Image (cartoon, helix red, strand yellow):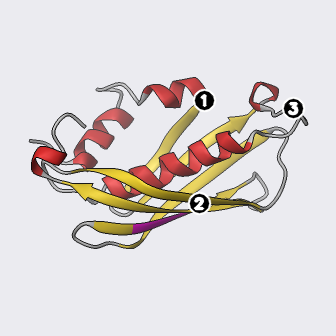
Amino acid sequence: MTKMLDLIHMMQRGEIAPPPVAALIGFTLASVEPGCAVVEFEATPRHANPMGTLHGGVLCDIADAAMGMAWASTLDEGETFTTLELKINFLKPVWTGKLTATGRVVQGGRTIGLVECDVVDEKRRLVARASSTVMTLRGAQATGR
């Protein structure tokens, strides 16, 4: 079996396809190391909500991706995970431009962990901060995930 970090690196090298949601929304994994992942995203008018600003769900998606990759990068062979809770604070409106989401493991445990993410704009201004509680799955729980 392969560790999740190895699979993530294979994805970065183009040896396996990225998750379909990455193509749907348009984000890419810029970097990953154990416990930390950086996702990049270019907000365009196609990502707007009815008021014309970036839809909050898209911000949540890129933060979730960065946090998920950060947690996944810490998993052993045969392990996967699921999200138990996700929270995001929207701090600054965005219309268009490059955003960077940096996910990092705050507290890792055998089963439950806490992950956070800061989303910043091109000027490094904080746009959103997210947190997530995750649960590592093993054995039969991890099968097929």
Tag 2 residue: 87
The residue closer to the viewer here, 29 or 71, is 71
Residue 15 location (% of width, % of height): 29, 26
> Does the rendering let one see residue 76?
yes
- Mark 1 and mark 3 lie on one chain; the one further toward the N terminus is 1
Which amino acid type corresponds to the residue marked 3 in the rendered image?
Answer: Pro
For the residue labelled by badge 1, is the local secondary structure a helix, a strand or a loop? helix
Q: Is residue 85 above or below residue 56?
A: below
The residue at 40%/29% (across/down) is 18
- Mark 3 and mark 2 lie on one chain; the one further toward the N terminus is 3
The residue at 15%/39% (across/down) is 143
The answer to whether mark 2 and mark 1 are in CB contact below 8 A is no
145 sits to left or right of 107:
left
The residue at 64%/59% (across/down) is 88
Residue 49 location (% of width, % of height): 81, 34
Give the main secondary structure of the magenta stretch.
strand
Q: Is residue 136 above or below residue 2?
A: below
Q: Which residues are magenta?
A: 114-118
Q: CA distance from mark 1 to mark 3?
A: 17 Å
Which amino acid type corresponds to the residue marked 2 in the rendered image?
Answer: Lys
Q: Quadrant of the N terminus?
A: top left
Tag 3 residue: 50
Count neighbours of disc 3 (C-alpha within 10 A) and say few if under 14, some if 14 to 19, many if 20 or more.
few
The residue closer to the viewer here, 74 or 53, is 53
